[in-house]
Amino acid sequence: MRLQRGADRHHTRLDWLHGRHSFDTGVRPFGQDTHHGVLVVNNHDTIAPNTGFDTHPHRDMEIVTWVLEGSLVHQDSTGHAGAIYPNLAQRMSAGRGIRHSERNDHAGGHPDARRPRPVDLVQMWVAPDRAEIDPGYAQLELDPRELDGAFRVVASGRRAHRNEAAIGISNAHAAFHVARLAPGRSALVPDAPFVHLYLARGRAHLEDAGALDTGDAVRLTAAGQRRITATEAAEVLVWEMHASLVTSD
């Protein structure tokens, strides 16, 4: 078990962006802390109104975006465009090459999209288990009640989740879960050889790890099932992984 406090993350501070990076990938020239399991990016970004990431390329990566507040407008070179907002499961497969932009510009389908406020999101990158696949895109709006009090499978490539995942990803060893817990409520964290737990909002207590605050992360390696209990309203993001970048089961 490895606990990473939110205050210890690398920060990117620009006039339009506050990025908090759980891994070194792409933020330090000679990063050593580059992944856990097959998860290589866990960025918590806050983007100011009328700004964002202009068109840029990606390759051979499964990119999952989970918006906490606000609305992010996505456009890519395969013709997909639309708003990403809370409770919307979204994945972009970069495959053999894709270009896209992500902006907080108050457009799209969310009712609050035209309110001038920052967008708060967590973007996560998972290495695919096959290179050079066709680029792709998927999204599905979830009923927020599905996330209350228990972990919901938001994105997965595992056969075990074929009938319950909201959207698929191109990695047969990984799954992304989300739970929202009211104070005093608890849930069992999915067990796997590699687990990455990120407390996106609130405060909680994780069995054998102790108190967690917003921005804290815990990396579990063959650690067994653990219970997380909210001490104030909390949103918990978990990657369940049955492979790593160097080994697989």
Image (spheres, helix red, strand yellow):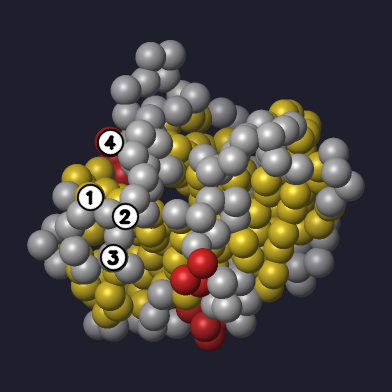
Residue toward you, 47 or 86 = 86
Q: Mark 3 points at which residue?
A: 191
Labels 2 and 1 touching (C-beta < 8 A): yes
Drawn side of residue 141 relative to residue 99, left or right:
left
The local secondary structure at tag 4 comes to helix
Give the alpha-carbon distance from disc 1 to disc 3, as whole Å.
10 Å
Observer-side mark, 4 or 1, equals: 1
Give the alpha-carbon distance from disc 3 to disc 2, as whole Å.
7 Å
Q: Dividing the picture into quarters, in which one does residue 134 lie?
A: top right
Query: Hey, what amino acid is under mark 2?
Result: Val
Res. 221 mark:
1
Q: Name the residue under label 2.
A: 195
Give the alpha-carbon distance from disc 2 to disc 4, as whole Å.
20 Å
* Outermost residue, top side: 29
Where residue 27 appears, as percent x and y from the top left, is 46, 24
Please give the name of the residue rendered at 60% of the width and 51% of the height, measured from the top-left corner. 170
Q: Is residue 196 visible?
A: no
| Rendered position, 129 above or below 27 | below
| Rendered position, 126 above or below 84 | above
Query: Hey, what amino acid is under mark 3?
Result: Asp
Observer-side mark, 2 or 4, equals: 2
Labels 3 and 2 touching (C-beta < 8 A): yes
The local secondary structure at tag 1 comes to strand
For disc 3, the neighbor class at 10 Å (few under 14, some 14 to 19, many from 20) is some
Query: Hey, what amino acid is under mark 1?
Result: Thr
Please give the name of the residue rendered at 38% of the width and 14% of the height, measured from the top-left corner. 30
Q: Mark 4 points at which residue?
A: 8
